[in-house]
Amino acid sequence: EETLLLRATMIGKQRLFEQKREAVSKVEALIKQYQGAGRLQDVISLSLPKNEDISSVFNQLQAIAAGNGLVIEVFNVQPLPLRSRVAENKLSGLGGAGESLVRPLGTVRLSLRLVGSYEALKDFMRGMETNIRVMDVVGIKIEPAGDAAGNLLVYTVVADTYYQN
């Protein structure tokens, strides 16, 4: 009987040890998860900044254009109206009940006039696609530049970029 009592005590202590080890593992996993959260927030803030941050957008597009052999001749900015929370909730099927955790995004429409080769434009578009800032191309217009060689074109690129409201 003493042997059974010792075995029961040992099994109980092993289970307690396993439970504590699982708890420690879960806490360590949570700590690792939240340590990366600061970096994740930084990335989200770069992708969807908390304001329009037009100078940053211009610098990013200027660097992409210059790196691909394009020249920005004109850069126009047009803030678009925000949709109200009620409209956002109706679109998402939430109705008007309660406070939504999702905030509407602000949108800024960019219009760029670029000059360069067609290959440079394709590389520029790839650069916009992989850029940290979220942008959607709305339209592209291509015209001859009127140079003697005929290899330069003028592009009007219209794109939307977003920010957290």
Image: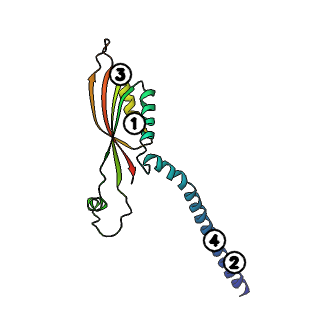
Precedes in sequence: disc 4 or disc 2: 2
Q: Quadrant of residue 89?
A: bottom left
SS at badge 2: helix
**59, 139: nearer the viewer:** 59
What amino acid type should be assigned to the residue bearing mark 2? Met
Q: Position of residue 48 (x, y in %)?
A: 42, 49
Query: Which residue was labeled with disc 2?
Result: 10
Q: In the displayed structure, does residue 11 sit left or right of residue 143?
A: right
Front: mark 3 or 2? 3
Give the colouring mode of the picture. Answer: rainbow
Q: Residue at x 45, y 36 (%)?
A: 60
Q: Position of residue 105 (x, y in %)?
A: 36, 52
What amino acid type should be assigned to the residue bearing mark 1? Met
For residue 82, above or below residue 157: below
What amino acid type should be assigned to the residue bearing mark 4? Lys
Q: CA distance from mark 1 to mark 4?
A: 50 Å
Q: Position of residue 68 (x, y in %)?
A: 42, 26
SS at badge 4: helix
Precedes in sequence: disc 1 or disc 3: 3
Query: Which residue was labeled with disc 1?
Result: 128
